[in-house]
Image (cartoon, rainbow, N blue to C red):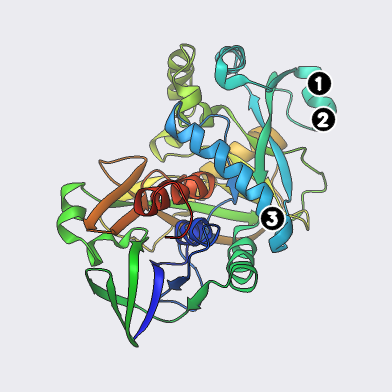
Amino acid sequence: MASFDLVVVGAGIVGLAHALAAARRGLHVVVLERDACANSASVRNFGFVTVTGQDAGATRGRALRSREVWAEVAGEAGIDIHQRGAVVVAQRPHALDVLREFAAGPMGERCVLWDQGALRSRIPGIDAQAIGALWSPHELRVEAREALPALARWLEERHGVVFAWNTAALGFDGTTVVHSSGKLASDALVITPGAAVAAFAPDLARRVKLRQCKLQMMRLANPGFKLPGVVMSDLSLVRYGGFAMQPSARPLESALEHDRKAALAAGVHLIVAQAGDGSIVVGDSHHYGDHADPFTSSAVDALILDEYRSLFGDPPEIVERWAGYYPVADRRPVLSEELAPRVRLVSVTSGTGMSTAFAIGEETLEQLFGAGTKG
């Protein structure tokens, strides 16, 4: 029976983050993945490493650290950073008030307010309703469906991490893992199951009321302009905790309830992220349920495109549509549970995996192995 210092179950971004944290300590690591590649939440998102607007405290701190790690590994792993920075556009006076309050506080460090003239000079053709914006230099944007396989290849080639694809973890006995091809022994085990917590810890899944959030997203053809960074709009200000905590967010939400009621009900807010080929990923919506409903709604897509239209005019051709999923639970933003001595289950339950996973991986490895390196 093969033996490793650490077995990681799951090759999504949370699993890869734990593998990286372990490899940097000099540990011998194997990653078990039930599919031929990561194809769930980790590759169905914007690839948007978000700092500005994250909840104050631990989430923001993890996002800042994870952004550092993304910047460190991207070049070595051959991962293109397609955009740097974010533009949060205000279309309503209360939204501009929120951005001013945010910029004046500690979380607004290095952010810059743009007036309408500065915004229009940087995004020509943006709708006249846009009255200003906040520029944040902190964000990075990668193409998730490309970045995850590249990161796995680099971990294998540069750090000697062993990957067992198409290998389902069936259970564990202490730190010995039973999988679809046999058994593995290890000093420690980290299970990163995404929404499949019940497969390993059904009582835990029930206790934290684990459920799924479904997102609708689209890729649009190249619109013929280049964005200076990932773009968000007024609706984002009432979804991101760092913005929503500002006093002006309450009157903004009231204004949005008046003229964007259907969008709010569908959990729609606008993120526009541009790829290297100029195409843009647009989304998203939020619907919650006990299972991964596979059906998408054209009416919800229309709400997302309406929000895009309010900033940029008529959208270009839709190239792709898809649904993304991430787990949510009563325990947020991270479910991290010791299932047995030296066995931890880790699932990000707030949709912030791309933004915070690297820091979470480092935290878990410190819990399992202490502050030092191997041994």
Which residue type carries mark 2?
Answer: Arg
**Residue 152 in the image: above or below residue 285:** below
Q: Quadrant of residue 186?
A: bottom left
In this rendered view, identify the residue nearer to me: 148 or 215: 148
Label 1 vs label 3: CA separation?
Answer: 31 Å
Residue 300 visible in the shown view: no
Q: Relative to 52, is 71 above or below? A: below
Which quarter of the image is occupied by the N terminus?
Answer: bottom left
Q: Considering only order in the chain, which callout, 3 or 2, is on the residue closer to the N terminus?
A: 3
Check disc 2 and report the residue beneath it: 122
Tell me if mark 2 has few (under 14), some (14-19) or many (20+) residues whose alpha carbon lies within 10 angstroms of its own.
Answer: few
Tell me if 322 is positioned left or right of 84 in this view. left
Which residue, given by chain and number where applicable, does mark 1 sit on? 118
User: Please, what is the three-letter code of the amino acid marked with disc 3?
Assistant: Ala
Measuring 66% from the left and 55% from the top, which residue is drawn there?
73
Residue for point 27% across, 74% down:
176
Three-letter code for the amino acid on which mark 1 is drawn: Ala
Q: Secondary structure at mark 1?
A: helix
Dot 3 crowding, Cα within 10 Å, few <14, some 14–19, many 20+: some
Lateral position of residue 26 relative to residue 197, left or right: right
Q: Is residue 199 visible?
A: yes
Residue contact at pointers 2 and 1, CB within 8 angstroms:
yes
Q: Of the residues under marks 1 and 3, which one precedes in the sequence? A: 3
The x and y percentages for residue 118 are: 81, 21
x and y, in percent, of residue 42 in the image: 50, 58
